[in-house]
Image (cartoon, rainbow, N blue to C red):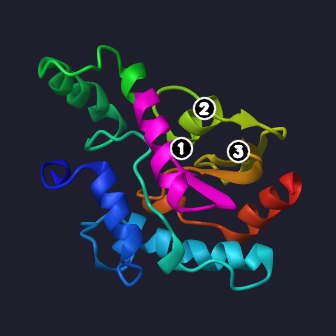
Amino acid sequence: MTDYKKTNKEWVSERSRNSDYCHLSKGNWGKSPLREELLKLPSVLNDYYGDETFDKSRMILTNGLLLASEGVSDIPNRFKQLKEKNTDFSRIGDIVKSSMDFFHNCTLSLSSPSVIFAYGNADSGHSAWKYLTQYYKVKSDIISIPKGNTGHYKFCSITIGDRKVHVIGSPHPSYGYNHLESDLISKGLSKIA
């Protein structure tokens, strides 16, 4: 529903000007454990990098597909509604490309990430991991680190402009069993460093 208030570009620009606002602290996240897991992310990354580089106030959170949905299974329904409004999007691939173009041209113009944490790491269907690794040139082998019986983390480096950026593909932490595991994330990052 936020799209009715401001465009994505307006939200990103507003948040970049207001460094005191942290959507993780002040946004409405409902009952999902996702918010609590994302609040742990700077500490998990600092464990590996060995400093205090990462902080929640400097995190940028964005939806991999700029289409409001209640989850991956709801994306086709939401896209169908969008298509019925006679927009320029005739295929889901059109909105994926537009979303990634927005991420590249707008979000990244306001930041210089050294790490991108993609929650949702499927290679098929819809996932932030899939969008990133198809849109950008993957510079390293993709490393997979098993995470118990519930999935695995994926790691690679991509090229954004002239920079190498590490990507962590995580099982979606909105499920309680997918809590962040610092030792596994450090192990994966060390293999692509």
Measure the alpha-carbon separation of dots 1 and 2: 10 Å
Answer yes or no: is residue 122 visible.
no
Residue on which the image places disc 1: 104
Decide which of tag 2 and tag 3 comes sooner along the chain.
Answer: 2
How crowded pointer 1 is (Cα within 10 Å; few <14, some 14-19, many 20+) is rated as: some
Q: Position of residue 58 (x, y in %)?
A: 52, 75
Judging depth in this view, the residue of 181 and 81 nearest the camera is: 81
Q: Count every numbered label the image shows and give the total.
A: 3
Judging depth in this view, the residue of 143 and 165 nearest the camera is: 165
In this picture, is 111 found above or below 133?
A: below
**Front disc: 1 or 2:** 1
Marker disc for residue 96 = none
Q: Position of residue 90 (x, y in %)?
A: 29, 14
Left or right of 128: which side holds 66?
left
Q: Which residues are magenta?
A: 96-119
In the rendered image, residue 107 lying in the magenta stretch gets the answer yes
Q: Position of residue 66 (x, y in %)?
A: 34, 41
| Residue at disc 2, secondary structure | helix
Q: Residue at x 21, y 27 (%)?
A: 77
Q: Amino acid at mark 1?
A: His
Q: Residue at x 14, y 55 (%)?
A: 5
Judging depth in this view, the residue of 179 and 116 nearest the camera is: 116
Decide which of tag 3 and tag 1 comes sooner along the chain.
Answer: 1
Decide which of tag 1 and tag 2 comes sooner along the chain.
Answer: 1
Q: Residue at x 75, y 69 (%)?
A: 183
Marker disc for residue 161 = 3
In this picture, is 143 found above or below 176?
A: above
Answer yes or no: is residue 3 visible.
yes
Marker disc for residue 135 = 2
